[in-house]
Amino acid sequence: MVDRNKRTLLLLLIDSLIIMTSIIIGNYLISGGLMMSAVLRNTLVSTVLFAFFGRKFGLYKKLWEYASIPELLTIFKIILATNLITVLTLLAIHDNYFIKLMVVVFMIQLLLIGTSRFFWLIFRGKITQKSSKKTRTLIIGAGSAGNMITRQLMSDRHSNLLPVGYLDDNSNKHQLELGGLPILGYTHEIRRIAKENQIDHVIIAIPSASKEEMDDILRHCATSKLNIQTLPRIEDLAEGKIAIADLHEISPDELLGRKKIELEDSQVSLSIHGKTVLVTGAGGSIGSEICRQVLEYQPQTLVLLGHGENSIYSIEQELSALDHATQLVTEIADVRDRAKIDSILAKHQPAVIYHAAAHKHVPLMELNPEEAVKNNVLGTKNVAELAKKHKAEKFILISSDKAVNPTNIMGATKRAAEMVVSSVSLAAKDTVFATVRFGNVLGSRGSVIPKFKEQIRKGGPVTVTHPEMIRYFMTIPEASRLVIQAGALANGGEIFVLDMGEPVKIVDLAKNLILKSGKTIEEIGIEYTGIRPGEKLYEELLMEEEGLTETSHEKIFVGKHRNFYKEEVDAQIKRIVEVLNNPDMVRQRLKEMVPTFQETVEQPMPQELVQFFEEYDKENVVEADFTQTSGQLA
């Protein structure tokens, strides 16, 4: 408070001196001389009035470094009111006052007081621009969002970014300035402009840009050694939510470049609204996202079930902070503990169960096949059979494309889990059972994106198993939305297959992420480590006999599969359980249960994939430098 009062008194003293100076200059210009008594009377009245109006309009509460047009208008109003009332006051006491003098004094005061307020802004800007420690930054988008970001960066003492100029594809803006910074050229000129201006960082400030426009901008940025950040959505700009903290790194969905998948809300809401929903594996990547999206449909109760207390606590705290009327319940339990799961289902009587709990790490499960069986097969058997016992309306198993013609333990156990759900479904009257099968999920724990990002952060190299390794990818929100939608579509016994879009070569994903991280492929490097045990060059979403049938949702299909009878499946599982202490025997008996389980890496690529990537490679050569560096990979 003391510092604030000192600041106010200092500003008032400066303004008083400016008022006196303006009156002295005005008297000298109008009358050619000075009458000190008149000057003192005029100064005293004007200073008192200026202090009164300054306090009333909050002039001394404003920060000079944020001085702008609104503050200039405030100063204009205060000076105008001060001079008008000063004239009336002096006339009332029979003092002479000339209109010309008032006009001159008004103009001088407006110039000097306005200049004093903007001097600090100019001074701060010059000091900031001279700072050698700040990262020179280009703003793409010379619009309101770009201007806002520039103003915040220039006034933020703690920011390490120094805006240098703008790029904009509107040629009418070129050679002009925005916020004191030049608009230097087109987006496609970024490589040259960045080099000429020693730019190290780029902020894309076009929140209204479409996916196609953003992809085009990112492609141009990828040819330069630049760090890239983007602004959030246009809705956030309209609501005034943009701040420096809202800048974000390139996200997984920006890497895929796909439009957001929409749900058929009425159908989903009917299956969830007002009901009790239970999610196993609720602390995992997919399970936690299912929880977030289920919450939007206002279930009466959402039960978060998981084995890891930290992850369950984290998702519970996140959801509790949101505005909703749903009761959140946490349950720490292992799906392998049948008695515990039985008591939980008896207590909560869930209408819908999403079974996301699973071991999914391929190399680790190769080393621990008995643990994969316990969690993925026996755990699924427990939850599915108890869902039937407690008459849940729907049970949705989240499976994997690795369950199709599996070449590893993880995929084989997920296929066995599908067989379990099919067998339970045949004997169920009150519960609808279904399986949702999809491919790799970008950004999940253990997936390639976090691994690649960490390797890039450390300076490389990025490790890829094989140059021809191909996967189908979805983002976590995409996969979770479609799981919920498929659950709403389920009538019993289906295997839903999600449209994963176009296949992606892992090495292309790595290159893309390196470039969009502002590095060059030559700088980071890519190292091929060889296919790991149990891995395929490409994954399939369907077995030959399953075929595909469309559903009401364009991204969801139903695969036709053979029925599995409970007695047969139970007998096969019993044989595996008998040898759980012998990993080699577990592997052998899992092959007997899942005949398509073949441990081999010899896998010729289907002709349609060969043709797809031949065409893809022709159409997606980034630029000359890209092809030059890609030929020098380690």
Image (cartoon, grey):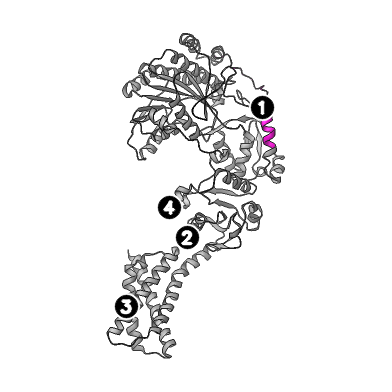
The circle drawn on residue 608 is 1
Quarter location, residue 102: bottom left
- Give the Cα distance between marks 2 and 3: 36 Å
Amino acid at the residue labelled 4: Gly
Residue 480, position as x, y percentages in the image: 47, 31
Q: Are marks 2 and 3 in contact (CB under 8 Å)?
A: no
Residue located beneath label 3 in the image? 85
- Give the Cα distance between marks 4 and 3: 38 Å
Q: Is residue 600 magenta?
A: yes
Residue located beneath label 2 in the image? 155
- Give the Cα distance between marks 3 and 1: 85 Å
Furthest residue in direction left, as rendered: 93
Give the magenta-colored segment's residue range: 594-617
Q: Is residue 216 left or right of residue 103?
A: right
Q: Of the residues under marks 2 and 3, which one precedes in the sequence?
A: 3
Q: Classify 17 as above or below 180.
A: below
Query: Which of 532/152 is in front?
Result: 152
Q: Is residue 260 left or right of residue 50?
A: right
Q: Classify 619 as above or below 13.
A: above
Q: Of the residues under marks 4 and 1, which one precedes in the sequence?
A: 4
Residue 361, position as x, y percentages in the image: 53, 27
Residue 66, position as x, y percentages in the image: 44, 63
Q: Quadrant of the C terminus?
A: top right
**Residue depth check, mark 4 versus mark 1: number of the one nearer the observer:** 1
Q: Is residue 128 magenta?
A: no
Q: Of the residues under marks 4 and 3, which one precedes in the sequence?
A: 3
Q: Are marks 4 and 1 in contact (CB under 8 Å)?
A: no
Residue located beneath label 4 in the image? 240
Q: Of the residues under marks 4 and 2, which one precedes in the sequence?
A: 2
- Give the Cα distance between marks 4 and 2: 18 Å
- Give the Cα distance between marks 1 and 2: 56 Å
